[in-house]
Image (tube, rainbow, N blue to C red):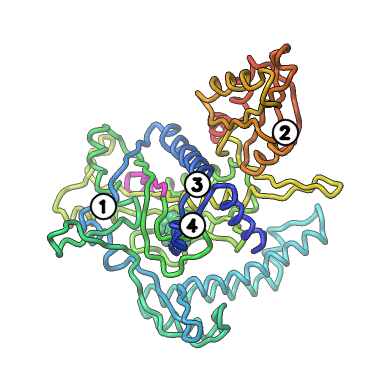
Amino acid sequence: MSEEHFKNVISHCKEYGFVFPSSEIYDGLAAVYDYGQNGVELKKNIREYWWKSMVQLHENIVGIDASIFMAPKVWKASGHVDGFSDPMIDNKDSKKRYRADVLIEEYQEKYRVKNQKEIDKAKARFGDTFDEAQFVATNPNIARNNATIAEIDVKLKEGLESGELDKVRDLILELGIACPVSGSKNWTDVRQFNLMYSTQMSATDGESQIYLRPETAQGIFVNYLNVQKTGRMKIPFGIAQTGKAFRNEIVARQFIMRMKEFEQMEMQFFVRPGTEMEWYAYWKEHRLKWHKNLGTDAGKYRYHDHVKLAHYANAAVDIEYDFPFGFKEVEGIHSRTDFDLKQHEEFTGKKLQYFDNETNESYVPYVVETSIGLDRMFLVLMSNSLQEEDLGEGNSRTLLKLPAALAPYQCAILPLTKKDGLPEIAKKIMKDLSLEFNCFYEEKDAIGKRYRRQDAIGTPICITVDHDSLTDNSVTLRFRDSMEQRRVAIAELEHIISQEVSMKTLLKGLL
Ligand code: ATP
């Protein structure tokens, strides 16, 4: 995928009512976006797929909905007031600001791309007999590139973990990294920049500074005991939540990839200390399965182990997707130890322990979390689904090949003409199917044109009511991907649509 494709995704999102710049008539607000009439449906469906797979399909996971505002001390305890910052660096010539660690990671990525090219070349040469694992283990160029990546990892980690940020700057200079805008290597020092937004809780008391939550996780930690006791939850169990989070991102760009206001879908899984690595492995695998179940190319996803562990983690991995601008994180799986609950115990003086009937002991549970950005997942699906399909003889169509159950509309109901009683039949079908599915209704324009419009917003099935429907009580189904047309009885519609496009069908792939 290319930058060109990314531009197409952004303009498609705008043109077809998926995503608009926020406050656009005021020239927009940097790194803030609004979801339009189709975007809100896709977003809701992704959220539902996540919620059902996490909560409904796991008997030991329940959900909550915590507030965005929390007692300010929560963020002191969690480490966000003192530690939730990014190392930033400015280029003196372009005056552009960058995350120092990201500049270095992007430099490393070039070596990974080189490796992939070696692999692709060899694959093409050796064909079916190609043994990728053996090739990767023995090829000297790949070994050299990997050594370079590893060496940089060590130095970056050293600088970030020790807090000696001049080491990070030295590394940028040593690698000869230039500003992508000015092309110069004229860099400032590296400084830490806190990402939390704050405001005042009360209009009269200037002292009461309060934060907009930068992650949803803390709402779960502070409610852990409430849920455990009232829900009579037995370890291991999980608490899931979706909701808005806010970060004053230094470099907010790449469309909805990195926003200042975004939505997270998080699940904290509470486990017996000592079992966290088993659960970490479980969730690592389970979450990738969730992504692949959407039909995306397996090669588009990869795991990326964290070099620098956050202050709360003893293991962490990202699930990355090959966006048009390269592999980037969509989801993180973190083994957070008992850090957060212990901190809240310390700051509140309240016990947050669990009594384990099986071992007859009390302990502060360990936590494994899965944390995915809903907006990033939206971008994964848009990038992966949008294509221009060549239909031969100079014709092509714009196709949004979304997973059927997640599409804004599951079906479109299209009477061939506006008269002769066809709209009446179509409206009746609409009334019945709307109880279960989001259905689009349209009478205007030639049928071919209407099909194309549905292709572009990802509607998997069109139902066409024609003159024969008046006598044979049947309609034509037209499938988005194959463009195949099939005649079916109206009485069977609900069953067929359900088989093809329901959330149930999608969820079955996870079992
Ligand atoms: P990054 O390294 O890309 O800044 P992160 O490691 O800070 O991400 P987490 O704190 O692990 O991200 O947050 C969990 C998920 O929330 C991420 O995997 C991502 O999908 C999403 N997310 C984080 N920050 C943003 C943002 N500014 N805009 C959109 N989504 C975000």
Q: Amino acid at mark 3?
A: Gly
> From which residue to which does the magenta span run?
264-278
Q: Is residue 315 visible?
A: no
Q: Dot 1: few (<14), some (14–19), or many (≥20) neighbours within 10 Å?
A: some
Using the image as rendered, state which of residue 452 and residue 485 is in the foreground: 452
When the figure is inspected, residue 273 is found, relative to residue 420, above or below; the finding is below
The reply to whether discs 3 and 4 touch (Cβ–Cβ < 8 Å) is no
Q: Which residue is mark 3?
A: 36
Indicate which disc residue 396 carries.
none
Residue at mark 1 to residue at mark 4: CA–CA distance: 25 Å
Q: Is residue 376 left or right of residue 221?
A: right
Residue at mark 3 to residue at mark 2: CA–CA distance: 25 Å
Of tags 3 and 2, the one toward the viewer is 2
Indicate which disc residue 21 carries.
4
Using the image as rendered, state which of residue 71 and residue 464 is in the foreground: 464
Residue at mark 3 to residue at mark 4: CA–CA distance: 10 Å
Residue 85: horizontal and vertical position, in percent?
35, 69
Of tags 1 and 4, the one toward the viewer is 4
